[in-house]
Image: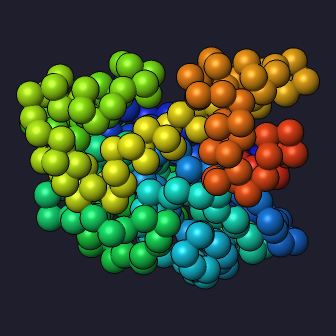
Amino acid sequence: MNLYSEHYVSKTCERFVNKIWCLDNSIGESLIENKLVLPNGCFNLAIVTGNSIEVHTSKNKYLMSEGFYFCSQMTNKVLVNIQPKTKVTIIQLHAWTLSFFPKYNLNNFTDSIIKIDPSELPFKTNLNSDISVLLNRINIYFEELNSITSSKNTIEKICEIIKIHHEEITVSEIGKSLNASQRMLQIKFKSSTGLTIKKYIQILKFRKSVDQMVHSGLEKLKLTDVALYNQYFDQSHFIKQFKDVTKTTPKMFNSDSYFLSKKR
């Protein structure tokens, strides 16, 4: 049994859902402790079954017993301890997905986790759904959402522009591209994601740098090359950004301590 696994939604569904990942200690007899997760610019919907998982964010410590949880955008590394006989299934939603549900105002909601009632979920599922059943229900719901919301809203357009420009664009330039005021874009983005546009760009750039380091191997890739490739001002600026999130330097970074995305 793999502690960490990834599962992928349909191509259409990928507009709203990045992937599903599982932390499975359901047949384990011992505590899995001091594992780390990095921010990635996504929201997470977590389904906990069995005993519990303990999560430490930069703001608080959460003991998540069996149930459904909504996890906001994270801006720093997160530490997790997984009890024996516990499984956590995590649905990773893109930054713009929640903006299609206007009733949610996430203006001051970052680095936080709240327990939710299953009735609050837009799609129906239960705690013990098999991954194939869960995937099917998510695909059906979000494919339908895609068909009735073919037009991209402002938040999705902002994120698309950032991706097209490889995280190298200013809020002013985004405003010109969308023919909208910077202030209006900032207010909308913060309300829908909890982040400023600048912070969102920083998170994406940081995560892309880490993935590049891990998949290339630090011994094969100089830090200067990583910094330049991802268009940081210089190596020292990259190291500072890295330490802000991980509390360690790139050279001291131990990827084995983290749950990191698989290379697709």
**Residue 240 rendering spot, x and y as whole percentages:** 68, 45
One can see residue 195 in this view? yes
Q: Residue at x 86, y 39 (%)?
A: 251
The quadrant in which the C terminus is found is: top right
Report x, y in % for residue 146.
19, 34
Q: Residue at x 66, y 36 (%)?
A: 238
Quadrant in which residue 222 is drawn: top right
- Counting from the top left corner in percent of width and height, residue 34 is at 80, 65
Foreground: 191 or 231? 231
| Image quadrant assignment for residue 237 | top right
**Residue 235 x %, y %:** 71, 30
Left or right for 30, reference 127: right
The quarter holding residue 227 reads top right
* Residue that extends furthest to the right in the rendered view of this protein: 219
Viewer-nearest residue: 72 or 27: 72
The answer to whether residue 215 is seen in the rendering is no
Residue at point 27%, 64% (across, down): 107
Q: Residue, x 22% and y 41% (percent of image)?
A: 155
Left or right: where does residue 91 sit relative to residue 171? right
